[in-house]
Amino acid sequence: MKIALLGKGKTGSKVLEVATDVTVFDSTHRPTAQGLRGFDVIISFLPGDAFRELIPMLVEASRPVVTGSTGFAWPENFDHTLREKNLAWIFATNFSLGVVVLKQLIEKLHQVEHLFTEKTFSIHEVHHTKKLDAPSGTALSMKEWLGSPCEITSERTGDVVGLHTLTLETPGEILRLEHDAKDRRLFAEGAVWSAKFLYQNQLPPGLHAFQKVVERHLAL
Ligand SMILES: NC(=O)c1ccc[n+]([C@@H]2O[C@H](COP(=O)([O-])OP(=O)(O)OC[C@H]3O[C@@H](n4cnc5c(N)ncnc54)[C@H](OP(=O)(O)O)[C@@H]3O)[C@@H](O)[C@H]2O)c1
């Protein structure tokens, strides 16, 4: 499987540790639609704004795409665009398996939240000081999975890979769901797994969320 890797920063560089036959594109070696056609799968760990700018070119390249980029909005009806072009892409704000389980726990919490008459939800996320977007894509996904009002706070310190805490507080108790990523290799492993999944043509055309792909694949 020939991988074109967009972005070889803190996270992208880990893709080189978990996959072979990887060609890197970055600010000094920019990708083109023509050049990308020679690859089986494209993986992006570019910052969100750089990735967003490349979307039309990536569609033109007509290859499967796995993207972990965060901090951008998808073009309107993009799932429809991909289906029209017969292309399958996988995206994730967080490629860790722990966050797949966290999603399930959050959805369970949403199902039972009526048990608590007086309650507040909050999410606190902590990342390294070089992170460009705030709140993190993972925190925004967690809020979406919860489906209830929830304040998000962000903290930037040291080289924290990614710490996310969802808190439910009532007058009598506090419940916390927490995910603490220890090594960025985790995200690269999820992205490469997704790339293999696309390479084996295991998904219909469209824009697929990594967590849903894993849930369906493992019948969780
Ligand atoms: N989904 C997940 O599991 C997950 C996990 C971690 C991070 N992320 C996301 O992944 C993205 C990257 O994070 P990171 O911490 O790895 O960032 P980073 O260390 O800053 O690396 C960014 C990379 O993108 C390249 N780049 C930047 N602007 C570019 C442009 N206009 N054209 C081509 N290449 C460009 C940089 O190349 P130069 O150095 O040559 O500019 C660098 O190689 C962020 O959006 C982050 O939130 C996602």
Image (cartoon, rainbow, N blue to C red):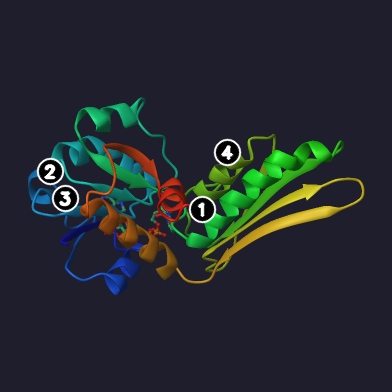
Label 3, label 2: how far apart the Cα atoms are: 7 Å
Secondary structure beneath label 1: loop
The residue indicated by pointer 1 is 220
Label 4, label 2: how far apart the Cα atoms are: 33 Å
Front position among marks 4 and 2: 4
Mark 3 is surrounded, within 10 Å at the Cα level, by few (under 14), some (14 to 19) or many (20 or more) other residues, namely: some
For ligand 1, the image quadrant comes to bottom left
Identify the residue at image location x=38%, y=45%. Answer: 48
The residue indicated by pointer 3 is 31
Asked if ligand 1 lies within 8 A of label 2, the reply is no
Mark 4 is surrounded, within 10 Å at the Cα level, by few (under 14), some (14 to 19) or many (20 or more) other residues, namely: some
The residue indicated by pointer 2 is 33
Whether residue 5 appears in this view of the structure is yes
Say left or right for 151 vs 142.
right
Asked if ligand 1 lies within 8 A of label 1, the reply is no
Q: Amino acid at mark 3?
A: Pro
- What x and y, as percent, mark residue 185? 40, 70
Q: Earlier in the sequence, mark 1 or mark 4?
A: 4
Q: Amino acid at mark 2?
A: Ala
Q: Earlier in the sequence, mark 4 or mark 3?
A: 3
Label 1, label 3: how far apart the Cα atoms are: 37 Å
Label 1, label 4: how far apart the Cα atoms are: 19 Å
Whether residue 153 appears in this view of the structure is no
Identify the residue at image location x=70%, y=45%. Answer: 109
Label 4, label 3: how far apart the Cα atoms are: 33 Å
Give the number of the disc on residue 144. Answer: 4
Please determine whether, in this image, residue 190 is positioned above or below residue 132.
below
Asked if ligand 1 lies within 8 A of label 3, the reply is yes
